[in-house]
């Protein structure tokens, strides 16, 4: 995950480098995929991050990049970091934001909506 000041401009830069945009229902949250390596980046605008993440997690993301990791169950995640909060999204995930030694990690599980 990367917090960027202009999502559309950043998407254009990555598209020029061969990434393919994976739009969401939110213009402030766009995925980018490099098809050859299946590498995926997630770009977040500040407004979107402020609405969808705990404030401490947004601050942590502002200091660098973060990981977004899909898990089968948050109950099975054994983290030694500091939990910054959990959010349930309208698009069917429960996310736990953790400050690890390596930076911000968002663990996400799919839930029924």
Image (cartoon, helix red, strand yellow):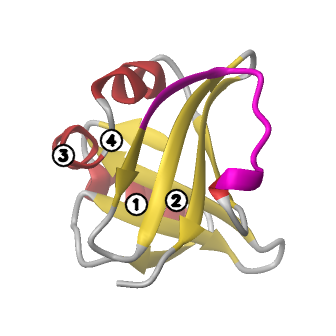
Q: Which residue is mark 2?
A: 14
Q: Which residue is mark 3?
A: 51
Residue occupying the point 43% across, 52% down = 43
**Dot 3 alpha-carbon crowd within 10 angstroms: few under 14, some 14 to 19, many 20 or more:** few
In this rendered view, identify the residue nearer to me: 57 or 95: 95
Q: Position of residue 21 (x, y in %)?
A: 46, 75
Camera sees residue 93? yes
Number of callouts: 4
| Residue 32 position in % (x across, y down) | 53, 67
Instruction: Using the numbered discs, state the Cα–Cα distance from disc 1 to disc 4 in whole angstroms.
Output: 21 Å
Measured as percent of width and height from the top left, residue 44 is found at: 35, 49
Label 1: few (<14), some (14–19) or many (≥20) C-alpha neighbours in 10 Å: many
Q: Nearer the viewer, mark 4 or mark 2?
A: 4
**Are there few (<14), some (14-19), or many (20+) residues within 10 Å of tag 4?**
many
**Crowding near the residue tagged with mark 2, few <14, some 14–19, many ≥20 C-alpha atoms within 10 Å:** some
Q: Earlier in the sequence, mark 4 or mark 2?
A: 2
Are the residues tagged 2 and 1 within 8 Å (C-beta)?
yes
Q: Residue at x 58, y 30 (%)?
A: 98
Q: CA distance from mark 2 to mark 3?
A: 25 Å
Query: Closer to us: mark 1 or mark 4?
Result: 4
Q: Which residues are magenta?
A: 75-85
3D distance between C-alphas at marks 1 and 3: 21 Å
Q: Secondary structure at mark 1?
A: helix
Is 42 displayed left or right of 12 in the figure? Answer: right
Would you name the residue on which mark 4 appears? Answer: 53
The one of 65 and 105 positioned closer to us in this rendering:
105
What is the CA distance from the residue labelled 4 to the residue labelled 2?
24 Å
Q: Give the mark nearer the N terminus: 2 vs 3.
A: 2
* 108 up-or-down from 50: above or below: below
Q: Secondary structure at mark 3?
A: helix
Q: Which residue is mark 1?
A: 11
């Amino acid at each position: 995950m990367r917090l960027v000041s202009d999502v559309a401009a950043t998407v254009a830069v990555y598209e020029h480098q061969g990434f393919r945009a994976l739009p969401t229902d939110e213009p402030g949250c766009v995925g980018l995929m490099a098809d050859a390596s299946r590498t995926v980046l997630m770009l977040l605008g500040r407004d979107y991050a402020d609405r969808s993440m705990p404030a401490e997690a947004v601050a942590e993301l502002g200091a660098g990049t973060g990981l977004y990791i899909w898990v089968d169950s948050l109950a099975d995640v054994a983290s030694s970091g500091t939990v910054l909060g959990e959010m349930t999204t309208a698009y069917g995930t429960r996310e736990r934001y953790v400050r690890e030694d390596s930076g911000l990690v968002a663990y996400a599980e799919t839930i029924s909506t």
